[in-house]
Image (cartoon, rainbow, N blue to C red):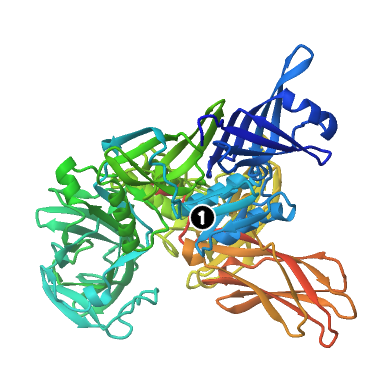
Amino acid sequence: MSLLEIPCASITILTNSGLTIEALSSETRVVQAVTEEVFSAELKIDYEWLKDQESIKGSIEIGQTIDIYLRRGESDPWYHAFSGRIWSLQKDIEGHSPRWYLIHAKGWGKYLQDEYTGYRRTVGPVTDVLQWIVQPLIDEGKLSNAYIESSTIEVVFNHPNDWISRWDAIAEICDQVDWDFYVDNQRIFRAFTRGSRFSIESFENKITRVSYILDGERIINSQRVIGSSGKTLGSDSEYTESALNWTSDGFVSSTRNLSGDKVVDPDPRYGAGQYVIQAHKSDATGGIYLQRNFDPPLDLSMFGTLKFSFKYVFGAYAPWWNVGRSVKLSVRYMTDSDNYFEYIYELSGVKPNKVALWLGWQWVFGWAPVELNFNLYTSKSPPNIVGNPRWDSISAIRFTVLEPLPYSEYPSAYLMIDNMRFEKGFYSAFHYDSTSIEKYGERRGPLIYDPNLNSDAKCAALADQILEAYKDPLPIFQELEINDIAITSPGHKVTISVAEIQDVEVLLRRKEIILDQFDLRTRMDLAPVRIPSLERLLERFAKKLEDLEEVRLSDEISAAMVAGFFTSPIGEHDINVSRSQDNLVKNSQFEVDADLDGIPDAWYPSDSSKVYRTQDEVRFGQFAARIPEGCTLESELFPIDPSGGYFGELWAKGYDGSSRGTLSAYMIYYGASPTFEPLRTVSFCEEVSPLTWTRYNFIDDVNNVPVNARWGRVRLVGEKGSANFFDDITVQRLIGIDGGKSYYVRPVEWSTSQTSPVLVWSDTWDPNAMDLKYVLTRVGADLKSGGGNGYAALKVVLKANDTPKDTFNWATLETSYQRYQKNGSMDVTDFGDTLILEYYLHTQAGEGDVAYMRNPEAWVNVVALKERARNPFDDQEPI
């Protein structure tokens, strides 16, 4: 380029007449960016370039297509810097004619910002989901194509409403997988893994200014990462099949596990084994214990649940000696004998058996499967702490029976433990770099929690990635400027060498090309590429904490934070947890009676002299409610939100061993105060007489809930007889999108000319993955026939554990698409472990027709946690 050559911008504008206006501009600014903003341009054109052309080719107006080409000099090629639409137009008028046109334009990505998705949820490989979002714009000609990196990584887009732009939806999805995207000047949508594109353009001899800092504040040389809570430790075969490592204040042995001598764990993964650990103490009036020793010590810092089965046998003087219905057990987690955590558990509901012996009686508790919470899951019941124990160094666990103890005349006792292991541990990793710690001192990174990390190895990989990126001060390039046009596209990696900083890879996030008279330069915003910036990384994982919808896991994380183990990823960070699965019924197991009047608190009997809580027949805990004929027991009113459906469940029994009863139970919706008008009654059960404890439930879809309902209550009724027992009452608001409904739809089209059924779609929901259960309430699809004498038919089969539960069929002779829909409902208890929905499309035999189907849908309600929902009222101590 000679010194006389002048940089310039060539402008072409397509007018409404279909003709092209051409002009030059000496003041132009073009911005190209990735993910955060669409391409844009600003330019100033002398009206002398335009007035003759406008009179012939038409005036310049908002919405017209504009292209900008830049070059350094006449000997250089034109660089296509921008293509888009005019967004605003300003005229600078002097006298009677414009002097300047000031034009603002937006790139083709603006179409993604201006259109809404129109849906709320989709799940699938990231490549397919992004293609789905942009395809309508390609079909309309607003975008020309989509180049999306091929990936099978699953993403979930789940938005509370459908008023989200396609651009924001894409940004949310790309954030889940650390991708970037933009729409280029050829109207092509591009999406790819962040940092996966590399440019060979060199800026070494063009740099006019660079700004960077060596950031010592960002050093991280030790990092903890927490994953999901599916980790287990130990097993029956490892801990309780041999007396090795067991000690006691009595005689320890491993006793043969005879058939019928124990309760086998209901989880098939944990077998009964052949032996149990037994301690026999001839004088146990002062207690008896069993202790399991661990060498090397266990790291229980990321655990919170201990499971085992136990049996306790002791002597008593007389059969009338009341030993109660519970065993008080001390469990010590010992770093050593002088330093330990101790929890005292009241194992209620353990019904003893008394066996006649010569000169006395023997009481037997068990076998009882036990699940005890400790450490992470016991923020409301902290342990007694003696000395300075450490959860990451537990050398022994001691089980001690405190009550009841044997009578002095018959002091012998047996304590047996079996099937011991730890569950619900969090996968985790804590890694550090010793060299960095020696140089800079320990600089611990904020804790990162990601429930998608389902192994220690994955947690370790992320911790190592963070250490590798931040163990030394990073050169953070804030801005780079060159005296030329940078042709590298945003989202690409470039290599920078300047002064003492050599060969540093950075990511081009944004570039701004500026032409100002004779000055042409490019300013670039850069970012590290080894991993996302720390701020963005923490923001991402903090968002995952906020977005947790599974209440039990959320409670576990909250409890851990309260206990002081977890620190929030971004300091003072509130976890926004949906409480939609809380039990709305207070004192749902009738355990609380603070005024000792015999009536469970928060419940109101029709006759307090006849209705009472009892220990005669109990399903859970220590108490149930007994309601004789002609009486009712009603719960305290609880709030109702008519924008969602409701799920109710209770246990009932109509037999006390000698007499029968008949009972009913209802949920009633009421209007607002002061009238509290009854609006609708839903039945748990009506006039039933169950001989054993039986579960009854209802599912009330959002469409059935009265729109003016504001309150609700449960009414328990004794219809006949006095043996009417109720326990464990639950009413929950259905969770999920749109007040309990989760909508699944596949926007694809299938066709078949075969005469035998062809499986075209099968979806599986796994409740175990999220501890949820589901109920299908509606299925549907668009169907049409290809014409002729044949027909198109659709069969939808619903299966639970691969067993057909229901079938829906449609047939049509229509040659245009018609909507077919079937409403139904399936009791949640029928589902078992998996729900499978299969769509079959087929045609009439021998007719040669073609069957078409599109937009199959399924409406699914999320109805309950596997573990019983709790009401905060129930956390009071039973009396």
772 sits to left or right of 19: left
Up/down of 151 relative to 204, above or below? below
**Residue assigned mark 1:** 192
Residue 877 visible in rendering: no
Quarter of image, res 203: top left
Q: Position of residue 31 (x, y in %)?
A: 56, 36
Q: Position of residue 206 (x, y in %)?
A: 42, 37
| Between 494 and 455, the one nearer to me in the picture | 494
69 sits to left or right of 868: right
| Between 491 and 52, the one nearer to me in the picture | 52
Residue drawn at point x = 19 percent, y = 46 percent: 436
Residue 288 visible in rendering: yes
Q: Hey, which residue is sitting farthest right in the picture?
A: 789
Up/down of 709 relative to 7, above or below? below
Q: Hey, which residue is sitting farthest top in the picture?
A: 95
Q: Mark 1: which secondary structure?
A: strand
Quarter of image, res 498: top left
